Amino acid sequence: MSDPAAPPATLRLTVDTDALAANWRALDALSGGADAGAAIKADAYGLGIDICVPALREAGCRTFFVAHWSEVAGVIKHVPGEQVAVLNGVLTEADCGYARATGAVPVINSLDQAQLWTTTGGGRCHLMVDTGINRLGIGQAEAGDPAIAALDIDILMSHLASADERTAMNRMQAELLSEAAETILHKRLSLANSAGIGLGEAFAFDLTRPGLALYGGIPREELAEHIRPVAKVEAQILQTRNLAPGEGVGYNATFIANTHMRVGTVSIGYADGFLRARGPGNALGHEGRALPILGKVSMDMVVIDLAAAPDLAAGAWVEVPWNIADAAQQSALSAYELLTVIGPRLRRS
Ligand SMILES: *Cc1c(COP(=O)(O)O)cnc(C)c1O
């Protein structure tokens, strides 16, 4: 029996690939003489590798950053392995073998990783030096180690801890990377993430690594005028109903009607990434009209007040704000979390 075609989904994520490409070109231009790469880890921040990577490639991007080796297979369907950098580096011989088989390039993070890469055959790699974030990377004092001298390093990189803030640490990290670059042979230098690009060309070196801003996030005001929204989320009303005064809505009846109300049950919930933190106090929308959320967000549903939209009935599409700057403020979620929690039902739509 052949699988019947599934009917259309009741929720949808639309990725504006023109806006994504325009954001990459804007960030590339803001990087001055440096090239922009792209951080595409976590399924392109939840928006989908298969949609985002071809658009970025067509825009001109030639360096793609993922975190895990498990992310490589999906990316090399679209770009050559040698353009893919794996931030976690190599922990095992299996990692090294997979790197050589796919052409994807490890970002070496420690002397142990350097030795492992060399003893399993060496070859082109990147190197992370820690300049203060204390997550991954070799220490400043390890720059002169013979294990590092044995590497064939393309990109020598570091990562800014607080690029979204005005702090002396940014300048200090740039100086420490420049210092390491005097000891460590390399071809290209890289420091700035999205917010780092907003700090100015002094932070761009040879290659920048924007992620969030590609997808419409604005981590620094300097970027606001250059970045377009990319993700649009909509969901359908499944049912409408009338509440009498005293009736509650949703689990634990945390909303109680004090008047007659017409409400709609919308097909999106926390399983889709519309987290419970975005419940009361937030609203969905329809052509500029705000439709306040009533009660708790459920796994698959959320209930909205239809007072402002008496014309809407079952089947109508409503807008689910994924405007990350605003929603992040509304919900105490970071813009990064808001994107990367996009659930599988929404990604597939
Ligand atoms: C995720 C990541 C980036 C991209 O950061 P954004 O803040 O999303 O622009 C750049 N570099 C490294 C090492 C990363 O882990």
Image: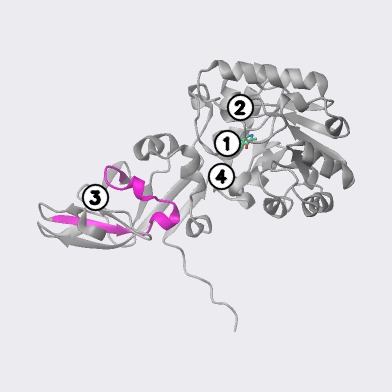
Of residues 45 and 94, the one nearer the viewer is: 94
Of residues 90 and 235, the one nearer the viewer is: 90
Disc 2 packing (10 Å; few <14; some 14–19; many ≥20): many
Magenta highlight range: 261-283
Disc ID at residue 214: 1
Instruction: Name the kind of residue labelled 3 in the image.
Output: Ala
Residue in the image at 46% along x and 55% along y: 12
Instruction: Name the kind of residue labelled 1 in the image.
Output: Leu
Disc ID at residue 309: 3
Disc 1 packing (10 Å; few <14; some 14–19; many ≥20): many
SS category of the residue bearing label 2: loop
Mark toward the start of the polypeptide (1 vs 3): 1
- CA gap between label 1 and label 4 equals 10 Å
Residue furthest to the bottom: 1
- CA gap between label 2 and label 4 equals 19 Å
- CA gap between label 1 and label 3 equals 34 Å
Tag 1 near tag 4, CB within 8 Å: yes
Label 4 residue near ligand 1, CB within 8 Å: yes
Residue in the image at 20% along x and 52% along y: 255
- CA gap between label 2 and label 3 equals 46 Å
Label 1 residue near ligand 1, CB within 8 Å: yes
Mark toward the start of the polypeptide (2 vs 1): 2
Q: Position of residue 320 (x, y in %)?
A: 38, 48
Question: Between tags 2 and 1, which lies in front?
Answer: 2
Q: Circle 2 sits on which residue?
A: 160
Q: Circle 4 sits on which residue?
A: 45
Of residues 295 and 69, the one nearer the viewer is: 69
